[in-house]
Image (cartoon, rainbow, N blue to C red):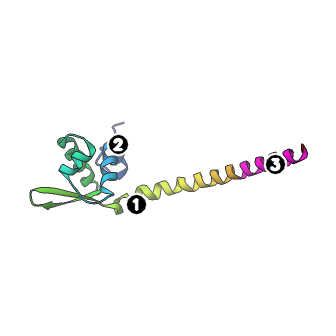
Amino acid sequence: MARAATTADAFNAVAEVRRRQILDTLAGGERGVTDLVARLDLPQPLVSKHLRVLREVGLVEVREQGRERVYRLNAESLKPISDWVRNYERLWTQRLDRLDAVVRELKEKEQGHDSRNE
């Protein structure tokens, strides 16, 4: 089966580590391509390629500022990923709550055992 294009949706787009780095950087505010290249220490053509993919799936928006293109994060486009992860957060929370209960029970048993030995 052929692999889905990286431009198909946000999930595929963020599967690439450099694109996540770009998104993380843009979470701090708008950045020009030159600034992204310097901050990420990546070649300009590579940054531009990844920005194009992120723009095509709607994760970033671009505007012209003089001769430079300035990019900003479109956080609303991350909502499908957030919604999907939220299901797993519930699972993790339930498991951690159960683990907390086990740890408390073990501590209580240990404290009860220690007080009998005194």
Q: Position of residue 107 (x, y in %)?
A: 76, 48
Mark 3 highlights which residue?
A: 111
Mark 1 highlights which residue?
A: 79
For disc 2, the neighbor class at 10 Å (few under 14, some 14 to 19, many from 20) is few
Q: For numbered disc 2, what is the local secondary structure?
A: helix
The correct choice, above or below, for 64 with respect to 18 in the image is below
Lateral position of residue 56 relative to residue 100, left or right: left
Q: Earlier in the sequence, mark 3 or mark 2?
A: 2
Image: magenta residue range:
101-116
Label for residue 26?
A: none
Q: Earlier in the sequence, mark 1 or mark 3?
A: 1
Residue at position x 73%, y 49% from top? 102
Lateral position of residue 24 relative to residue 90, left or right: left
Picture quarter containing residue 45?
Answer: top left
Q: Earlier in the sequence, mark 2 or mark 1?
A: 2
Q: Position of residue 101 (x, y in %)?
A: 72, 52
